[in-house]
Amino acid sequence: MKTLMTHLSLLICLIVALSNCSILPKAQPSAVHDLGYSNSDAPSLIKVPSQQAPITVEASKWLLDNRIRYRLLYADPTEVRFYSLDRWIAPPPELFEQLLNASGKHWTKALTINLHVFEQQFTMAKQAKVVMYFTATTTHAHVDKVIKQDFHLHLPCPTPDAKGAVSGFTLLTRQAIDKIQAWLEETRE
């Protein structure tokens, strides 16, 4: 009986191996994402106006890698997690800076952005939002005075996964650019 069970076990293993392990889930391919530059131009093809004021985006060292971060606020709000198969093509500060330069907006004053938060947050297992907090710094138009503005932006994700995070950040960063431009317009007055 023991020999029969051993042969049966070997037969099952052989069938599984010959069927190309179809009972096991297929490994998903990894993906690299950007923020969807306009017209999919390569960064080297983006023309920044010659009179363009310098734009820099800085961040704390934990945002200087290309992992897509998320948090399960409903389960463990202090734990930062990362998607294993999806990554940014560059760190978020670099992507945001590049997007600011590629936006087609004419920035008349030097601008420094300090990125504090750039993550997806799950409020429930099937509900997530993308969150972006940053401080913009420039000088007032009429006096040589440094002015700062904090921006706290969030947007629901279309899906509660990495793809939803990327889609959400693509929209949210464009909203951030519009809000920065509106704020800069206010500082002219």
Image: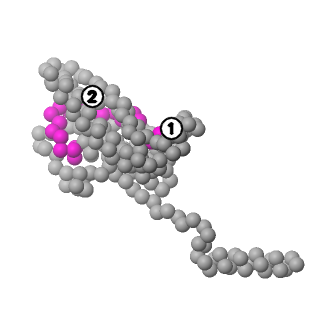
**Furthest-left residue in this view:** 51
Q: Is residue 28 visible?
A: yes
Q: Residue at x 29, y 37 (%)?
A: 176
Whole-percent x, y for residue 80 in the image = 52, 40
User: Looking at numbered disc 1 in the image, what kind of residue is underneath it?
Assistant: Thr
Viewer-proximal residue, 173 or 129? Answer: 129
Q: Which residue is mark 2?
A: 137
- Which percent across, then down, holds residue 167? 37, 49
Cα separation, mark 2 vs mark 1, equals: 31 Å
Q: Would you say 186 lies left or right of 60 here?
A: left
Magenta-colored stretch includes residue 176: no
Residue 178 falls in image quadrant: top left
Q: Is residue 20 above or below residue 72?
A: below
Q: From where the camera sits, is residue 80 visible?
A: no
Q: Position of residue 8 (x, y in %)?
A: 77, 78
In this rendering, position of residue 171 left or right of residue 126: left
Q: Residue furthest right?
A: 1
Give the labeled residue for mark 1.
123
SS at mark 1? strand
Q: Which residue appears at 53% of the width and 36% of the height?
A: 73
- Quadrant location, the C terminus: top left
Labelled pair 2, 1 in contact (Cβ < 8 Å): no
First reached walking from the N terminus: tag 2 or tag 1: 1
| Amino acid type assigned to the residue bearing label 2 in the image | Thr
Picture residue at 20% right of the left edge, 37% below the top: 54
Residue 162, given in percent of the width and then of the height, sits at 45, 50
**Quarter of the image holding residue 1?**
bottom right
Tell me which segment is drawn in magenta.
101-121
Residue 79 vertical placement versus 30 (above, below): above
Which numbered dot is residue 180? none
